[in-house]
Image: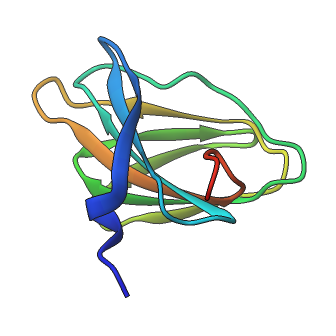
C-alpha cells in the first residue's frame, strides 16, 4: 500500500488553479484542484461517468445541472452521470481545495 499523495503530477496550471492527478492508479483518476480566491473552474460534463468531489479546505459553490450547492471543507458531493458541473471559489482570500475521483485512465502504464 502506498500514500497516493506521493504520486501526483501537475496536469494543468494557470491563473485560476493548479490541478494535480495521480500517476499510479490504472483504472481510476484521483485529481486534486487548488482553486484560487474568486476564481472558477471550466464547466463540463462527462457522458457515461460519475464523479465524487471531496472538499478539503475553503468555501465555494458547486454548480450542477439542477442546482447551486454551497460547499466547504468536509463536504462530499456526487456528480451523476452526464451532469454539468462547475466549481466557484467564493472566498476573496483563501484557496478552495478539493479532490475529484472518477473512473478512467489518463496515463500510459508500463
Residue at the limit of the structure toward the top, as seen here: 15
Residue plotted at (75% across, 59% down):
50
Residue at the limit of the structure toward the left, as seen here: 93
Say left or right for 11 vs 34: right
Percent coordinates x, y for residue 110 in the rendering: 61, 59
Picture quadrant where residue 103 is located: bottom right
Residue at the limit of the structure toward the right, as seen here: 48
Residue plotted at (34% across, 58% down):
7
Residue plotted at (64% across, 45% down):
106
Say left or right for 93 vs 80: left
Question: Toward the viewer: 80 or 105?
Answer: 105
Percent coordinates x, y for residue 90 in the rendering: 30, 30
Residue plotted at (49% across, 25% down):
41
Q: Establish if 77 lies above or below 66.
A: below
Percent coordinates x, y for residue 104 in the rendering: 72, 55
Q: Quadrant of the N terminus?
A: bottom left
Q: How is the image coloured?
A: rainbow
Picture quadrant where residue 27 is located: bottom right
Question: Toward the viewer: 54 or 63?
Answer: 54
Percent coordinates x, y for residue 98 in the rendering: 37, 51
Instruction: State the count of labels.
Output: 0
Q: Establish if 103 lies above or below 92.
A: below
Q: Establish if 59 lies above or below 74.
A: above
Question: Toward the viewer: 7 or 38?
Answer: 7
Picture quadrant where residue 3 is located: bottom left
Residue at the limit of the structure toward the bottom, as seen here: 1
Say left or right for 21 vs 7: right
Amino acid at each position: 500500500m502506498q500514500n497516493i499523495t506521493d504520486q501526483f503530477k501537475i496536469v494543468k496550471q494557470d491563473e485560476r488553479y493548479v490541478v494535480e492527478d495521480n500517476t499510479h492508479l490504472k483504472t481510476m483518476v484521483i485529481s486534486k484542484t487548488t482553486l484560487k480566491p474568486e476564481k472558477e473552474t471550466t464547466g463540463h460534463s462527462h457522458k457515461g461517468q460519475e464523479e465524487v468531489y471531496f472538499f478539503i479546505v475553503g468555501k465555494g459553490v458547486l454548480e450542477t445541472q439542477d442546482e447551486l450547492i454551497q460547499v466547504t471543507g468536509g463536504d462530499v458531493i456526487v456528480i451523476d452521470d452526464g451532469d454539468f458541473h462547475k466549481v466557484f471559489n467564493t472566498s476573496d482570500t483563501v484557496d478552495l481545495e478539493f479532490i475529484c475521483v472518477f473512473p478512467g485512465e489518463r496515463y500510459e502504464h508500463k
